[in-house]
Amino acid sequence: MALPQLIPSHYSSSLTHQPSINPHAANPYPIFKPFPKPFSLSQSRRFHRLNSLRCSACSFPDNHRTEPPKSDDVVELPIFPLPLVLFPGAILPLQIFEFRYRIMMHTLLHTDLRFGVIYSDSVTGTADVGCIGEIVKHERLVDDRFFLICKGQERFRITNVVRKKPYLVAEVNWLEDRPSGSEDLDGLANEVESCMKDVIRLSNRLNGKQEKETLDLRRNLFPTPFSFFVGSTFEGAPREQQALLELEDTATRLKREKETLRNTLNYLSAASAVKDVFPSS
């Protein structure tokens, strides 16, 4: 079974990454991407300065903004539907070439640099929960295309469509996780981190990579931003990522991620056993 590409070529720049799970295996679970390579845009020399950006745990803030928007605030937001899911704290490279979105970019670059990224596909349609993308780097080319590097910020829910042309604009309100009560969030986050390390270790073994000590994946992240980081690593399963994005409870999100990682680990364990019995397969 061919594994889906997360960012189609017509939306991406020359983004490259190296999945940790064997790309030739028929893996029914998400492709796990714990350590992506830098977003390489070096084919355009004018854009080489962006190569140092990475999508890793260090991109995810330890705390929220000093004055986060209130969940009952309603604002108008330009919306960019894409076949991918953006999480708070994640880094997203985009190439903008369609006329209506070039119009959007011209407006944004003279205002607040923020727009809504929302998941859309031909089967499920357009979701109503998305994530703010804030432009942190941009390059305008001579043919009026744009290369962008965006960073995920707050989540939002669309409450009303204001207009559809020349691009989608909607009223949104902000989503925040509810208090998790007596749940041990730090304990859950540590369990998820442990599962991630096991997946990385076994993935590297299957791919013939040298085993080495796994780094600290949490990097002092609080449980909520860590849960977003984990969700952002589930490449190849955008509908599962969308479900994780929509959850409004950190404990529930971490538990779901732990289950997905355990399923992936079971698959990798079985694949490893087959490889041991049939080394040439």
Image (spheres, rainbow, N blue to C red):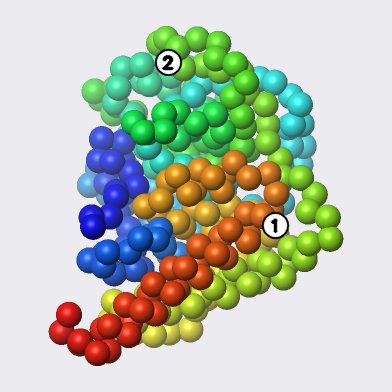
Q: Residue furthest bottom?
A: 277
Question: Is residue 3 something that shows in the picture?
Answer: yes
Q: Residue placed at 66% from the left, 66% from the top?
A: 189
In this view of the protein, which residue sits in the foreground, 258 or 94? Answer: 258
The amino acid beneath tag 1 is Ala
Q: CA distance from mark 2 to mark 1?
A: 36 Å
Q: Left or right of 66: which side holds 42? A: left
Q: Where is residue 51 shown, x and y percent of the image?
A: 37, 52
Q: What SS does tag 2 mark?
A: loop
Disc 1 designates what residue?
251
Question: Could you tell me which residue is drawn at 51 percent across and 75 percent down?
Answer: 197
Q: Are marks 2 and 1 in contact (CB under 8 Å)?
A: no
Q: Nearer the viewer, mark 2 or mark 1?
A: 1
Query: 13 above or below 205?
Result: above
Above or below, 39 relative to 206: above
Image position of 274 (left or right of 78): left
Q: Amino acid at mark 2?
A: Tyr
Dot placed on the residue nearer the N-terminal end, 2 or 1: 2
Q: In x, y percent, where is residue 121?
A: 37, 33
The residue closer to the viewer here, 142 or 186, is: 186
Disc 2: which residue: 167
- Dot 1: element: helix
* Of 218 and 123, the residue lying toward us: 123
Q: For residue 204, say whether it is visible.
A: no
Q: Quadrant of residue 142?
A: top left
